[in-house]
Amino acid sequence: MSKDDSKFLFTYEKVLKDQVLRKLSAKSSGSKSHVDLYGLKDEQTEIYKILENTVKYHEGKSVLIVGPRGVGKTTLVNNCLLDLDRKYGGAFLVIHLSGLFERDDKAAIREIARQFDWIMGAKSIKSRLSERYDDFEDGKRGDYEVIDENLQAQGNEQSAGFEKVSANATMNTIMSLLDTSKLEDGGDPAYNEDDEKAGVLSEQIPIIFVIDEIDKYAGDSKQTLLYNLFDMAQSSSTPASGESQNGQKMNPKAAGSALTVIGVTTKATMREQLEKRVRSRFSQRVLQINKLRTLTEFSKCVYTMLKIEKQPGEPELEKCIDEYNKRIENLVFQNGNAVRKAVVENFYTIKDLNALKNSLAVVVRYGLFDRKSQSFDPENGGLELYNNRNLAVLDSLSELELKLLISCARVKAKSSSDRINFNVAWEEYIKVASSRMKTLNTHLETMGVSFGSNGGEGSFMRSRELMLSCWEMLARAGAIGEPMRQINGINASSYTGGEFNRVYACDLELNEIMKHFKEDRFGEATDYSWVESWCRI
Amino acid sequence: MAKTRKQMKGWQYILDEDINEEASKKVSDSLPKRSLRNSRRSHRKDPEIVLRRDNDNLEVKMGDILLVNDDESADEQGEEEDLPSIGFVKDIAFGTDSFLDVRVLWFYRISEVDEDKLPEGRKSYNDNDTFLCPVMDKITLSDILTKCTVISDATLKKTVIDESNQDTTFVCRRFCDSDAEYFTDVIDWDEMFKCFQDNHEDFYKLVKNLTVRPTVKGFAKKLFKQGIDPRSLKAEEKKLKRKKKRQQQKNTKKLDYAENDDDDDDDDDIYDDDDFYVYDFEEKSEDSQAELEDEDSGEEYVDRKFRSSPRKKKTRAAGRPRKRKRSVKNVNTPKKRLKPRLPRVARKFQFNEDAKELDIDSLWEANADSETSKALRRAKKVLHTSAKLHSLPCREEEFSRLFYTLESAVQSQIGRCIYVSGTPGVGKTATIREVIKQLATSFIAETKQKMFNYVEINGLKLISPQSSYEVLWEKVSGKHATTSNSLVLLEEYFNKEDTKRKPLVVLLDEMDQIVTKNQSVMYNFFNWPSYQNSKLIVIAVANTMDLPERMLTNKISSRLGLTRIQFSSYTYTQLSKIIKKRLEKLGRLNKERMVISKDAIAFASRKVASVSGDARRALMICIRAVEIAETEFMAKSKEEKKKLDGKYTVTIMHIMKAVNEIASSPISNYLSALPFMSKMFLASILLRMRRSGVAEVFVGDVIDELNNQFHVMLFTDLRKRLDPEQLDLLDVIYGVRGKSQIRPRGLDFIMTDLEENGILIVQQTRLERSRLLRLNVSQDEILNGFRKDDLIREVIASR
């Protein structure tokens, strides 16, 4: 790389940096732009085809997308929806649910109602705006190709919208709107001619449900939501309106609104979790996205993450992008590079792109364009973020707490039982402390210095009360913790007899503590050299 | 048809160029890819072929009507003795893929037609009435039994039908569509036959056009009755558009359609046909009232006349030997006829076919234009569970039991409970709905009024079990009330004597979901029917047969009564029958139905029957197979596509793929894509488990095991891979800073990842080392995957 080139690169530093950082920090869900995914073309076209079939041919389907976190499942669906919107914008509705937000079926149904309300609201505002000069009522009822007449009608009937005060009523509204399979009795006064006309003449709008973390809804034994959605996806595809001579008829209101459910989950065992009648209604379509298998693929993926697409226009910028891409390629693929090392480490340990993204963002921000240093450490492929909690806790403990913890670990090692209460730990602490004191005294005595009786042990031994508060600190920090006791599969209520006798489990091994403090700790204020001797049994 | 000359054995063919010179145009449209070429040929005069059978000099030529032995050996059930099919020889020609093609149009016998669909009722027909339908099929020469005659109504009066000719003489008064569901008005067969002699091609088209169900007609008629002008509706736009064209046709009679057709292109495809149907309808709706009345009176007239004519033919006595010339040796007794068979559980009334359903073809995109992709798409549509069914095959027994139980209950106005059980996807709900529909119609037909009300409550579509009261009360009263109020009101309602009240049928679907702890909801639902005045009929549906005994207390199961209907899961024959039945909707032709090959259907149904007997699943597999075939077909090159077009079928391979896709669990794939550390983690768990013999392992132990492995094992392969990257194994595992090498990095992440993917079950606690782990998948599954992995193999093998 000649000097001119690099200088050249820096003229556009800010532009490039912005672009790369935007790419690295792009959030998949809810974003309005495509996020490039490496190696998922087939899956994307498949999902797209399914969705397109729904919109075009009114074909209901239920699909599960299974894969570990961070491989781009939601992004994939989002990309497809964006494509679909570009091509058939307005010809379908999308309802987003997430198992993390809507904890149970009731909340989910409420959310569905709310989103319907929102869509209708947005549409009626739009229609009001465009028919500004018509009277209000007309504006509300204005018929747009875009708007599903039935939805509209439903919305107007109950002017309050779909969401009701009681969960029951909400459920009923949603069901009557979406469920086509139900056989309705003819005598029902609710279905007058208007409905009928609407049912026959107006095309139903396809609805796409995207459910993140769908496994959360399978936890419930009833699986009501999944049952209903899958059932509707199954039974709703062909328009099934019409009636007999005598008025016994299918519900014309919801005739054939095609419904596709896309469930996104990490559980590879999701299908087995479904209840048998839910499984019977599921379309049996499982799309799996896995982590990349080979290192080459992985590094290519990293490269796609970092590189910038060429934008035609300014020739200088273009050249600059070329230069940048070359540089990135060099960094990612050439052995011995810091970035390359980080990529490889990440690949063999956690294989997680998000972790890598986070650490690379720092590199891009501070290292990559830095004229002088040219060295950048991507912090071990982002692995630092996933360090073990216990060891981090160790570093934060005070000396007394540490001593108490070591006493715990000693008891554990000696008695080979990991149930410890404060009394036991305290005893052990006294024992160790006094023995340490004795050895210290003998050392001192041999040196001819007497320690004196007044300070003596007292300076090492702290009061029981003080140690108890240390004990509580340890429990709070998680170095010791209440062991899970299960009685008949139910977590037993915790002990209430006072802090002294409460049973804890020590979460660290003695040798772990020892090793942890054995490391070279130059430049640290506290002296941990005593730890080793404390740990020796 | 005869594939080779050899198969022509016993037959001779004569090229007779003198016979019928004017009427020798031939157009075949049975094989679409040939239609173009044939249509070009259509104006050339082809020699007419006459076939002659050696042993009895039976001559077969165009326009003859044959009795054809039409047995499908693949069909297992030969329930009833079958009459030979009647076929109208449309043409005989030298074929491309076979030596000789004999193409026939089939007649429906009256016995094959659903009586309820016949216009004017069954009584106005003779036993040897037949209906021509526009289904073209090829037949084999060996199947030909003998010739017969079809006469018109007029000729019938002149001739005498007695025992000597009753098996070979048939009357044709109407045509019908390929499903024998729509019948044309009365037609003069002689005139038709003349038309055939004029132009064979147009005759076929004419039949096709005549028998197509005017799709929107029913709807329009209905509106008309309601006083709504049909023209004010959608039809108006179309009408305006086509006004010109229609005016040309306005006053033409039906027969003239054939002539009009001449103007059209010969390679008319379905789109044009569709348009044509629309004209048909529009013309009717234009002057519908008058014309309809005219026709009606005309028909009545004919019928009266006909009825007055002595019924010479009685139903065929069972013992009487059939007269059939069995001159050909290999003609066996016909076993079973599959083609135009009436639905077993026939829907006695039916919904209007939705206009959209016939319009499907117009939706196809230009790129999906080939015949095969069209066929595949149609197949998918038909196989989808939501596809409208005309019948429910293989559920006849349950159907009739339910039907009669309900019928008697409704008639006697006494409350009743029926318990229906069966695994998912065996057609419980579908059958019950069908019963309700038919019951309603049959009552209306008898008494001209609605005899019962009906409400459906699905346990899984309710938020809480108690809300079923609300639903029921809303149905009963039309008013809304809160749950507790509903209960009180319902109690009162069912206790009150009310003679005007109609019986109420309640379908309690997924009943097991409305079982509460004290079972009060169930109790009420089964208690109300026992009230004297309730007239409540409850059909409870659940999955398990012994649910009443298992989940319900005695006081409830005793109220449930003994009327229990068990839906057994489908056997493989039944499943394949169901699939075939659905595919039948694609068309009458064997070729059209062959979208999925017979073996493939059999394979799919066997696969499903061996596991669950779930019809939904069987259909799902078929749909998936069709999809796979579709993508495979689309991936082919243009020439290949052209070559395969029309012949492409879903084979056993596609089904196999679909089954594998559904059966295979994503776990093994997931496992093999795991990073090295995750694999090591799992391997360590396995080692620990092996050592301790307990299924649950502490995380601390696993960490120790991991440390052990990393310090003891060589990991040569991994080291080799890391070397060029200038990385050290232990540095990678523990991090450069972690000299002490206490715990590998990212363990928490790995563990959560495995847990989220359902591989591990991790005890939920704040502790790290003292957490318990358990594998959620079988050990073998993990081991098998790891044995293939170079990096991890030594750890596994070391045991």
Image: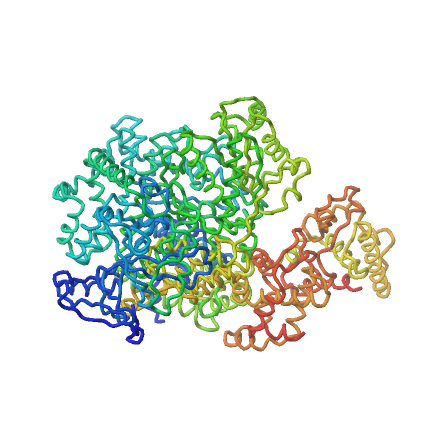
In the image, A33 versus B276, the foreground residue is B276
- The correct choice, above or below, for B496 with respect to A380 in the image is above
The answer to whether residue B734 shows anywhere in this view is yes
Q: Which residue appears farthest toward the right when viewing the image?
A: A453
In the image, A460 versus B549, the foreground residue is B549
- The correct choice, above or below, for B282 with respect to B319 in the image is above
Query: Residue at the spot x=45%, y=37% of the render?
Result: B439
Quarter of the image where one finds residue A498: top right
Query: Residue at the spot x=59%, y=56% of the render?
Result: B755
Residue B85 picture location, percent across and down? 34, 57
Quarter of the image where one finds residue A521: bottom right
Q: Quadrant of the C terminus of chain A?
A: bottom right
The answer to whether residue A18 shows anywhere in this view is no
| Residue B778 relative to residue A233: left or right | right
- The correct choice, above or below, for A449 with respect to A212 in the image is below
Residue A84 picture location, percent across and down? 34, 51
- The correct choice, above or below, for B24 with respect to B277 in the image is below
| Residue B773 relative to residue B281: left or right | right
In the image, B328 versus B360, the foreground residue is B328
Query: Residue at the spot x=56%, y=77% of the render?
Result: B717
Q: Quadrant of the N terminus of chain A?
A: bottom left
Residue A95 picture location, percent across and down? 42, 44
| Residue A341 relative to residue A411: left or right | left
Residue B178 picture location, percent across and down? 31, 52
